[in-house]
Image (cartoon, helix red, strand yellow):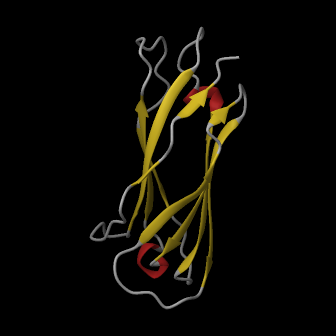
Amino acid sequence: MLVVVSCNKNNSGKPSISLESINTTVQANDSMRCTFKFTGGGQISNGYFWSIRIRTNVNPLTNQSGSDTINFQLPSFSGNSGEIYFSLPWNGYLNETATENDTFTFRFYVQNADTTLTSDTVNSPQIVSLYQ
């Protein structure tokens, strides 16, 4: 799930995002929820939000759930700064083993619609997905 809220401020140059909040422990049947602040919104309106999952488990996977790289097209909006709310479900994406917790880090960035401008990458802290 992805939600964008923006406000008007004049900003030029490269788009920018920063991670404002993220839950680092994901309970079974819950979701990882993130809030990002962005600037340069006029450049990313109709652009893309990217999330890259990096597994840090020691043991091999028993069930790979989905692609490690996902992206969503951002809606059209007129503001140049605002917030992006992003959520990933435990069920079907963050629960990769049936017998132990899973650990991940994520990389996030935004890109304009014609992919010529990309923000710096934001790295998450370690995320622990509880298996039960």
Side of 3 relative to 97 (left or right): right
Give residue 99's quadrant in the image. top right
Q: How many marks?
A: 0
| Quadrant containing the C terminus in the rendered view | top right
Of all residues, the one furthest to the bottom in this rendering is 10
Q: Is residue 60 visible?
A: yes
Q: Residue at x 72, y 28 (%)?
A: 29
Task: State left or right for residue 14 relative to residue 105.
Answer: left
Query: Is 28 in front, or is 76?
Result: 28
* Residue drawn where x is 58% and y is 12% of the image: 100
Q: Residue at x 65, y 43 (%)?
A: 23
x, y percent for residue 66: 47, 30
The residue lying toward the viewer, choosing from 15 and 4, is 15
**In the image shown, does 56 or 53 lie closer to the viewer?**
56
Query: Given the current orientation, which residue lies at the most extreme front position?
Result: 125
Is the residue 99 above or below the residue 42 in the image? above
User: Residue 30's image quarter?
Assistant: top right
Q: Quadrant of residue 43?
A: bottom left
Q: Is residue 76 left or right of residue 25?
A: left
Query: Residue pushed farthest top?
Result: 99
Q: Is residue 1 visible?
A: no
x, y percent for residue 95:
58, 23
Please provide percent x and percent y for residue 82: 59, 74
Q: Is 110 in front, or is 107?
A: 107
